[in-house]
């Protein structure tokens, strides 16, 4: 994979998920404190696990440096992982909210 083969999809995934909520599903998820608490918990555990998997001193997962920006924080975690994490978890929660009985469609 060359160029920003991991970065570009990560950068596109976030606004895509936000757009789906804002202009299609309209579940109100982003207005709920429980959603943001969920994201803090998810990112906390993601940081622990991803930090171990991507640490540059002994990586379990190795990224092609041509496919990412090279920005890593914290614990050598590529920032793209957090973008994908946000998009994946948010899309899943939006799907659940959309299918929940009694929600606006």
Image: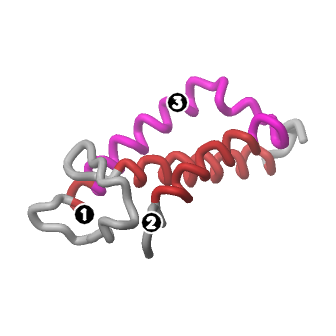
Q: Residue at x 38, y 59 (%)?
A: 68
Kindly check if marks 3 and 2 are in contact, taking CB atoms under 8 A apart as contact: no
Q: Tell me the mark number nearer the camera, choosing from 2 and 1.
A: 2
Q: Secondary structure at mark 2?
A: loop
Q: Give the residue pinned by disc 1.
A: 53
Q: Give the residue pinned by disc 3.
A: 36
Magenta range is 21-50
Quarter of the rendering containing residue 30? top right
Please state which of residues 77 and 67 is positioned toward the viewer in this rendering: 67
Residue 75, percent across and down? 20, 48
Q: Main secondary structure of the magenta part?
A: helix
Please state which of residues 82 and 64 is positioned toward the viewer in this rendering: 64
Q: Which mark is residue 3?
A: 2
Establish if 27 lies above or below 10: above
Lower sequence index among marks 3 and 2: 2
Kindly check if marks 2 and 1 are in contact, taking CB atoms under 8 A apart as contact: no
Residue 39, percent across and down? 48, 38
């Amino acid at each position: 994979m060359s160029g920003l083969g991991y970065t570009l999809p990560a950068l596109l995934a976030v606004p895509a998920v936000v757009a789906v909520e804002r202009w299609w599903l309209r579940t109100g998820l982003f207005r709920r404190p429980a959603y943001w608490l969920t994201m803090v918990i998810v990112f906390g555990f993601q940081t622990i696990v991803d930090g171990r998997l991507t640490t540059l001193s002994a990586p379990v997962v190795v990224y092609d440096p041509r496919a990412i920006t090279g920005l890593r924080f914290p614990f050598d975690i590529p920032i793209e992982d957090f973008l994908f994490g946000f998009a994946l978890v948010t899309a899943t929660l939006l799907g659940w909210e959309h299918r929940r009985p009694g929600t606006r469609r």
